[in-house]
């Protein structure tokens, strides 16, 4: 089965074609980051309008890249939630309309299911069941994935997501938006011994996270120090080390608690080099394995939506005729 995937839930326009026997045939990605940067965050209406502008030219480019056309497709998957309602509607309208025009089934995909399944685009994917750490700008969740469509949330953030804390701290350091990756780059020059930031919630039992206190701690250090370049790098290092160690402690706890030996990392913060190295070291000591999607599929993309949609279409699911999206869609409510 060959499926077109469309991702427009936030500030990335992503489209891709996934084939269940040949794998990923091609993908196109456009990020609106530069447009939103001057506002210090995503402006929903601007995001929707930009998806409208970009998505059709990108589809044409994808068809040229893959030498395929609508008649070569067996289905269409689009992100139906969670996300910004106007942005979601662009992908839903396009997906449903093309499905109707080409007379092929369509399926609305849960954005987080897309992230959870992104490592299946790689040559050596994990096997069910496994633990997934979903770390992005909007989510910090530990999920037990028993099989396709069966997701149990083991831990969640009580306030800010890890990526959000990265972005807010980066902004206080004058690194622009979204600053997670810039903060990580700056941290490479930081001293490991100058500052020590707290590791939130690690002394309490359970698998929940909380990052707003850490962000406030960082804000206090930033306000009370002279911010020369070295100090900024030292703060970036200490902040990153605190987030990374907190995430690693909770991942280890989730593996031990469930007895599972496979850990999968998904979402934009999964691109963080220090996090990847620390998780590699942790799983080695636990005789477990960690799986990362390639960097471009850590952040939002169309390939993960094409993959997840293909699995659901193969399982016999498809949309009804109504065009609908679900901006607040809970992951555990999914089934197959
Ligand atoms: O998954 P994603 O593209 O979008 C959401 O669905 O949120 O994740 C974006 C988040 C942003 O907060 C960004 O700052 C963060 O991922 N991020 C990073 C790095 N690269 C992206 N955070 C830390 N280190 C990085 N290298
Ligand atoms: Zn995402």
Image (cartoon, rainbow, N blue to C red):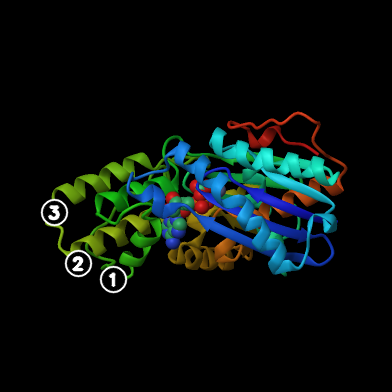
For residue 124, what is the image quadrant?
bottom right
Q: Secondary structure at mark 3?
A: loop
Q: CB atoms at circles 2 and 3 under 8 Å apart?
A: no
Q: Secondary structure at mark 1?
A: loop
Q: Crowdedness of circle 3 by 10 Å Cα count: few (<14), some, many (20+)?
A: few
Pinpoint residue 121: horizontal percent, then vertical percent.
Answer: 70, 62
Q: CB atoms at circles 1 and 2 under 8 Å apart?
A: yes
Residue drawn at x 67%, y 56% as measured from the top left: 59
Q: Crowdedness of circle 1 by 10 Å Cα count: few (<14), some, many (20+)?
A: some
Could you tell which of marks 2 and 3 lies nearer the N-terminus?
A: 3
Mark on residue 104? none
The reply to whether residue 89 is in sight is yes
Could you tell which of marks 1 and 3 lies nearer the N-terminus?
A: 1
Residue drawn at x 70%, y 32% as measured from the top left: 333
Residue 169 or 26: which is nearer the viewer? 26
Could you tell which of marks 1 and 2 lies nearer the N-terminus?
A: 1
Q: CA distance from mark 1 to mark 3?
A: 18 Å
Q: Quadrant of the C terminus?
A: top right
Residue 185 or 305: which is nearer the viewer? 305
Q: CA distance from mark 1 to mark 2?
A: 8 Å
Give left or right: position of 21 versus 116.
right
Mark on residue 230? 2
Q: Could you tell me how many numbered marks the image carries? A: 3
Pinpoint residue 307: horizontal percent, then vertical percent.
Answer: 73, 54
Mark on residue 189? 1
Residue drawn at x 49%, y 43% as measured from the top left: 47
Pinpoint residue 6: horizontal percent, then vertical percent.
Answer: 66, 49
Pinpoint residue 314: horizontal percent, then vertical percent.
Answer: 86, 49
Mark on residue 225? 3
The reply to whether residue 124 is in sight is no
């Amino acid at each position: 089965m060959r499926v077109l995937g469309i991702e427009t839930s936030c500030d990335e326009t992503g489209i891709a074609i996934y084939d269940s026997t040949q794998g990923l045939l091609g993908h196109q990605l456009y990020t609106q980051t530069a447009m939103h940067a001057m506002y210090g965050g995503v402006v929903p209406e601007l995001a929707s309008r930009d998806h409208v502008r970009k998505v059709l030219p990108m589809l044409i480019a994808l068809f040229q890249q893959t030498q395929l056309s609508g008649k070569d497709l067996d289905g269409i998957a689009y992100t139906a939630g969670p996300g910004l309602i106007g942005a979601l509607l662009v992908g839903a309208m396009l997906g449903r309309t093309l499905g109707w025009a080409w007379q092929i089934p369509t399926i609305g995909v849960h954005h987080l299911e897309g992230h959870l399944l992104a490592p299946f685009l790689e040559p050596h994917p994990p096997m069910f069941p496994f633990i997934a750490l979903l770390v992005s700008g909007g989510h910090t969740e530990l999920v037990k994935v028993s099989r396709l469509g069966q997701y149990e949330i083991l831990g969640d953030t009580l306030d800010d997501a890890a990526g959000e804390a990265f972005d807010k701290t980066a902004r206080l350091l004058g690194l622009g938006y979204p600053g997670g990756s810039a903060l990580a780059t700056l941290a490479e020059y930081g001293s490991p011994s100058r500052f020590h930031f707290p590791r939130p919630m690690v002394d309490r039992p359970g698998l929940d996270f909380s990052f707003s206190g850490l962000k406030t701690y960082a804000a206090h250090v930033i306000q009370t120090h002279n911010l020369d370049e070295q100090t900024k790098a030292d703060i970036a290092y200490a902040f990153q080390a605190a987030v990374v160690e907190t995430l690693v402690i909770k991942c280890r706890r989730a593996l031990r608690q469930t007895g599972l030996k496979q850990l999968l990392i998904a979402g934009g913060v999964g691109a963080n080099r220090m996090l990847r190295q620390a998780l590699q070291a942790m799983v080695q000591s636990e005789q477990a394995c960690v799986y990362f999607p390639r960097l471009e599929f850590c952040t939002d993309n169309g390939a993960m939506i094409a993959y997840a949609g293909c699995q659901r279409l193969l399982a016999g699911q498809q949309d009804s005729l109504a065009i609908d999206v679900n901006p607040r869609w809970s992951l555990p409510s999914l089934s197959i």
